[in-house]
Image (cartoon, grey):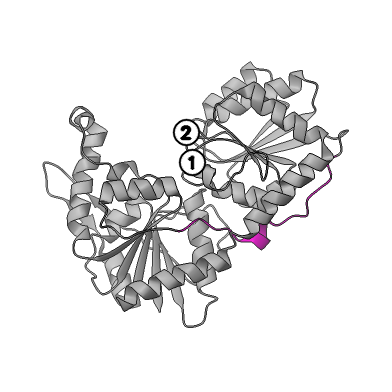
Amino acid sequence: MKILHIIPSLEIGGAERLAIDIVGALNKVDKIDASLVVLHDNIAYDVSSIEQVLKVIPAKIHLSIYRRNKFDLAKLQNYVDEFAPDVIHTHLYEAEIIAKSLRYSKASWFCHFHDNMPQMARFSLKTVFNKSLLINFFERSYLLQKIKAFKNNYIAISQDTKNYAEKVLGKKAKVTYLKNAISFNKFFTTIKVLDKNKVLKLINVGSFQHKKNQQFLMDVVNLLVKSGIQVQLDLLGDGEHKKDVMQKCEGLGLKEYVNFRGNVKDVPRYLGQSDMYVHSAYYEPFGLVLLEAMAAGLPVVSLNARGNEDITIHGENGYIFPEANPQEFATCIQSLSEDADLYKRIASKGQELAREYDILDYTKNLIGLYKESVKN
């Protein structure tokens, strides 16, 4: 079976990490030939495990309400025709709308809902008065027309995302809830014993977007410092709101306690050197990085971001708070840091959970979906 995955880029993000892991795992299965096409030459990850099957093929479309649509798809079309896949699997909206503009009806198509794609939202009164929403609706109408020509399947990474996909696509759409997965062994670290006399190392991984809410963590660190706790927070990632978070950090006098590491390729190493993972996002379709942190033996303290409800049981394998209360969050971190038995219990339960999400088991389920679709 020949399987083609398409994704806009390999910037830092959960969808990008998952695509790399899926293609790597697929190519370890007998009689499976998988390739990953990236539409933009932006690769922030170590891709040595899939470099033989990774292709950077520029492609783009420009849809216009008033003028003719423009397409630059020749190179991608040629590669698809040459590779002749049985399955085409897209990740993220840009890849979906570009791929559906190709002429290739021989494959079964899979679209991965890594989040509640706002571009797929249905028409509402707000659409009329908002230029961005109007453009989204125009593109959605174009995409839905294209979708009719293909054999479509959809994968949702959480129950919340599945509900959204069925809402925007209609109940007849084939939407399968397939929880995300990680390369467990890549992140596995033996659970450490905390030393109260050493600095407590916190870590957060994510792009600096408004929804990631890293400013909240500045308030949390501020409270921990005022409580006399020796603490260091590593923030991994980059983005448009990074400057705002840095300004708040400086304004609170926390520069010596917070490290802005930027985008890094060796996330497992940073996780392995940390003591606790703190997650501030108020919206998260799933929370792949939470599983990675759990695999690394870190207790996870998070806000309820909807998608992470599927994997976190409060007080058992981590902590998930319904409201962004810095004091409550800081108190939880302090309790974990001062109670060795509690720390070990939460970390152990989290690591057990993460092991259940290993990419190898995930790949078996995915291949089953591929085969069923191709057969039908």
Return the residue nearer the eye: 263 or 151: 151
Q: Judge left or right: residue 144 versus residue 269.
A: left
Is 20 placed above or below 218 here?
below
Residue at numbered disc 1: 284
Task: Give the mark, 2 or 1, whose residue is nearer the N terminus.
Answer: 2
Q: Position of residue 246 (x, y in %)?
A: 59, 26
| Circle 2: element type | helix
The three-letter code of the residue at mark 1 reads Glu
Residue at numbered disc 2: 211
Q: Residue at x 17, y 44 (%)?
A: 64
- Taking the image as drawn, is residue 50 in sight? no
Picture quadrant where residue 302 is located: top right
Is 185 contained in the magenta span? yes
Q: Are marks 2 and 1 in contact (CB under 8 Å)?
A: yes
The three-letter code of the residue at mark 2 reads Lys
Q: Position of residue 353 (x, y in %)?
A: 64, 54
Q: Which residues are magenta?
A: 178-194
